[in-house]
Amino acid sequence: MSKSSNKWVLIDGGGNSGKTTIIEYLKKLGYSIKSEQATLVINDSLNEGIKMKQLVSDPEVAAKFQEDIATRELNEERKFKDEELVFFDRACIDYAGVTKLRNLKQKPEILDMVKDRSYALAVIPDILPGSFTNNRTESVDNDPYLASKRLERAIIEVIEARGIPILRLPVVGVEARVDMILEECRSRGVM
């Protein structure tokens, strides 16, 4: 098991699992957060006339899309100090899992940039029942729930390979999920 030198907590996993809701609740409680960057890259791409389906299905466009996300995530992560408790909504390490899952060409220089990234704890919320209409990348899939589960598994594989401890969160209210996260952080000495 890897021991991280930072106090960073990664909230990650499949779409429609409540990651952003958890992050927003933690921010409301006064904790430092790093927002997920994929939405910004999606919006930039759509503004450039690239269709959502291309971002997911066109191998060249999708590979560039994932490179842009990883680069933005890494740049945001570099803004935080190791000793600072920060909750991350996704992270640059997702690049390795997403590109492998989608059989996209991986850029060695990006893999090299993210290879040593680590987190004190990774939190994987279970996927929430309901609509995937707000999850643009999963919603273009024929079965968005299965697409989300595949993404979750790919991300977990990357996290496990790095020896980062994982906390799985059941489907309960956001307050209960945040309480579980904070308790786990306290028990691991992250807070």
Image (cartoon, helix red, strand yellow):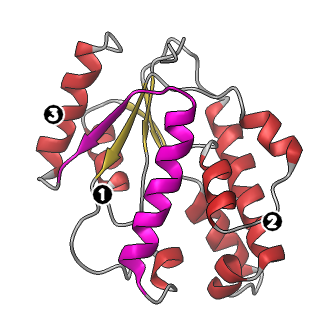
Crowd band around label 2 with a 10 angstrom C-alpha radius: few (<14), some (14–19), many (20+): some
Q: Kindly identify the residue that appears in the image at 23 percent across and 14 percent down.
A: 187
Image coordinates for residue 51, horizontal then vertical, percent: 68, 88
**Range of residues picked out in magenta:** 143-170
Q: Residues at badges 2 and 1 in contact (C-beta under 8 Å)?
A: no
Give the secondary structure at mark 1: loop
By secondary structure, the bulk of the magenta-drawn segment is best described as helix
Give the number of the disc on residue 18: 1
Residue 9 in sight: yes
Q: Kindly identify the residue that appears in the image at 23 percent across and 45 percent down.
A: 169
Image coordinates for residue 38, horizontal then vertical, percent: 59, 60
Q: Kindly identify the residue that appears in the image at 40 percent across and 27 percent down.
A: 165
Q: Amino acid at mark 2?
A: Lys
Disc 3 target residue:
179
Q: Kindly identify the residue that appears in the image at 23 percent across and 27 percent down.
A: 182
If the image is split into quadrants, where does the C terminus sit?
A: top left
Q: CA distance from mark 2 to mark 1?
A: 26 Å
Q: CA distance from mark 2 to mark 3?
A: 37 Å
Disc 2 target residue:
64
Q: Amino acid at mark 1?
A: Gly
Based on the displayed image, in which of its 4 quarters is residue 152 positioned?
Answer: bottom left
N-terminal label among 2 and 3: 2
Image coordinates for residue 156, horizontal then vertical, percent: 47, 46
Give the secondary structure at mark 2: helix
Q: Amino acid at mark 3?
A: Asp
